[in-house]
Structure formats: C-alpha cells, structure tokens
Image: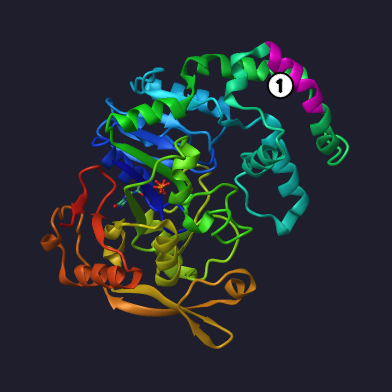
Amino acid sequence: MLTAVVGTNWGDEGKGRMVDLFAAEYDVVIRYQGGNNAGHTVINDRGKFILNLLPSGILSETTVNVMGNGMVIDIEHLGKEIASLTEKGVKITPENLKISDKAVICMPYHKLLDCLEEDRLGDAKFGSTRRGIAPVYSDKYMKKALRMGDLLDFDALSKKLVPLMEWKNLTVRDGYKHEAIKAEDMLNWLKEWGTPLIPHICDTTVYLNKAADEGKNIMFEAQLGALRDIDFGIYPYTSSSSTIAAYAPIGAGIPNRKLDEVIGITKAYSSCVGEGPFTCELFGEEGHELREAGGEYGAATGRPRRVGGFDVVASRYGAMVQGATSIALTKLDVLSYLDKIPVCVAYEIDGEIVHDFPTGERLNKAKPVYEYFDGFKTDITSARKLEDLPENAIKYIKYIEEQIKCKISYISVGPKREQYIKVD
Ligand code: GDP
C-alpha cells in the first residue's frame, strides 16, 4: 500500500501529528520534497518533538525512514536535529534512517544568498524562511548543486568545490559585494557534518522498490501544502518544490510506482505563514483570538501566522490538485471558544462571486465572502466517536465535506496522539 499524506492548504495543517498517528501502520515513511524551511510538531508519550528534516516516522520504533532525492538537506541542521532526538532517547541508525544519494545538499552559501536577497528586497521581501531553499533548488536546476552521494568521496568533492566557488562568488562577492566564499571552508563544513551521515546514504530507489515488491506499507509525507506547490500554488509566494502528491513517487525515488491512497490534511480553519495573498485572513481581535486558540506560531521560526476561517474555495482546490481520496480534518477543538464560526464560502473579484480558486492578479484582488455557522461551545477533546460530538460540530464537518467534495475520514480534536476520531 502506497499512501501519501499531504496538506490541502498553505501548510501547517497538522500533517506531522497525523503522520505520527498513522506511522505505526506503515513500514516505511518518506519525505519527498523540501528542506528545513518548515517544521512538524509532534507530541506523543515520549515528549514534544519538532522535526524540520527527519520524516515523522522516526519516532516510531519499527518504521524505516527515507529522505528522498526530491529533498534539499542542510546537513548541519540535520546533524543537530539527530543529536537533539538522540538526547531524548530516540534511536537513529542506518537501518531506520536512509538518505538518498541523489538528495541535494543545502550549503551555507544558499542560506547566505537567501538572506542577502531578502535584505536587498527590503519591504518587498518574499517572507522567505532564510534557510536557503530557493537558492539551493535554483542550483539543482542549474545543475550546479552538490548531492549527498558526493559525500562518499571527499577527494572528488574537493576538486569540484574550487570551480563551483568561483562561479558562486560571481554572485556573492561580485554581485552582492559580500565577503567571498572559500572552497576550503566549504570542504571543512562538508566533512564535519557530512561524515556522520555517510552510513545513512544509499540508493533509495533500490531499497524502496524492494520494499514495495515485498508488499510493505509505504507512506509519503509532504511538507507544506498544495497552495505552496511551485506550479499549482500561490506563485511566487510558494515553496521552490513540488508539494503535491503526484510528485511523491518521483521525489521519493520510485517514479515507477503509483499511489494507492492520498490523505489530504485540512485544518478546521486557515493559517498562512509569510507574505502573499491570503484571501480569508481575519484581522484585529477576531484574528488574534483564533491565533492564540490555535497556537499559530511557526514551528521552524516562531513567527506568528496569519489566520482566517475555513476557506472553502482554497480547500476545494487544494483537495482537487492533491487528488485526495480522503480528508483528515485537524484542530476542530480549537473552534470550541467561538459563538459563531466564520467560514469563507466564496471570493468576490471585481464584484463577481467566484468559487474556483483564482491565480495571479485575480487572486490578489479577491475579497472573502464570509458566512457564520453556529458554534458548538463545548470541550470536544475527549470525543472519540462522531456521535460524541455536539450537533453543531457535526453540521460543520458535513458542510465542509460537501463543499470540498471529499470524504472526511479522520477528525483530530487535540494535539495528543489519541485525540482523534476515525469516521467509518
Ligand atoms: P504541520 O507542519 O502540518 O505538522 O503543522 P504544525 O507544525 O503547525 O502542527 C500543528 C500544531 O497543532 C502542532 O503544535 C500540533 O501539536 C498541534 N495540533 C495538531 N493537531 C491538533 C488538534 O487536533 N488540536 C489541537 N489543539 N492542536 C493540534
């Protein structure tokens, strides 16, 4: 069984906790795109974990975790993430963590370039997480990137670095007038952080095909949601990678296999980090209360997230481009405090009511059309069956299900592993 677990919105839908919940049923969990520019927060009986790079299955003792070729990996960040988990008693070995030899290394100069460009842009900045993601993906497509497999031969790597740094300094030193990057410093950095990872580096295509042939349950874990996809998202306020499920087999290393199932993670309200159009945004006291109730601060950066009511237009589009076969609706409990639940039911563009998610300037001009649903005003964190929920909560769920045209199979009602409802 090949299952992708993906976000249908702007990211931060609570994918981490759902993957953590499902991980026990899967033999293999794979991250197939992105880098450490976002984070999953997982709370389970072993504590609270923030995972920026490692697949969420790392917390389940029997799961094999794969970092696929579609990823960009800051090896210093990965080394530190591994160390922090190891300190909390999580065992990480070459058997339970496999890193694709084709995954790209996110270098210190990628982070530097990200910062230099954001600073240059000033008020017009993109709201990048400054983790080097756009510069490193650009290098991948320029065919100037270093890959994890390069760490297996430091002699060959040191020869590659000299001309590579000459090229990079055309931008860093000559363009941005920053201090030049030295090939020697880069080699030392690669040796320091790369050496401990060597036992984990392998051909994940061979491993995953064998696992699929043996009938193993394989899960593909996305970072960031559909609206951050480089092609289908709110370009240019997207990530630099393909976040959608269709890319999962490619970014994981088994392009020859088809997904059996796509679980779309959708939050019961909306949140968005950084700049760009976010039509359903709520401001003032209404926004502040929702942000506090949902604890909407970035896992990777601590930045306050922009928040809004559930966005029917964006979520329907997100579920469609993901090809979701079912939906997990998360953080429903967060809405318990509301007398009236705000829902963005449509957009208005130049006086016209719009139900299909727009793009470009039309999206920039879109205004939300809000409707208010009766709140449920009850603590639902101990609900474990649909029948345990108040009537107004069930009405809200059914409405969302109808609007996004996809069955809701899971509802999460609290951050802990057991705080969820499975809908039959
Ligand atoms: P991700 O990147 O999609 O995993 O999203 P985040 O890192 O933003 O994680 C979502 C946050 O919400 C984390 O702090 C979770 O512990 C928390 N969370 C997840 N599910 C629920 C839920 O059902 N209820 C509440 N109250 N919190 C949740």
Residue 105 rendering spot, x and y as whole percentages: 61, 29
Q: Which residues are magenta?
A: 155-165
The magenta stretch spans residue 189: no
For this view, does 375 lie left or right of residue 203? left
Secondary element at tag 1? helix
Residue 83 rendering spot, x and y as whole percentages: 45, 21
5 or 298, nearer to the observer: 5
Residue 239 rendering spot, x and y as whole percentages: 57, 50
Q: Quadrant of the N terminus?
A: top left
Can residue 49 be seen from the camera position used here?
no
Taking the view exactly as shown, the residue that stands out farthest to the left is: 387
For this view, does 189 lie left or right of residue 328? right
The magenta stretch spans residue 162: yes
For this view, does 15 lie left or right of residue 99? left
Q: Residue at x 41, y 24 (%)?
A: 97
Q: Residue at x 39, y 58 (%)?
A: 323
* In the depicted structure, whether residue 250 falls above or below residue 188: below
* In the depicted structure, whether residue 87 falls above or below residue 18: above
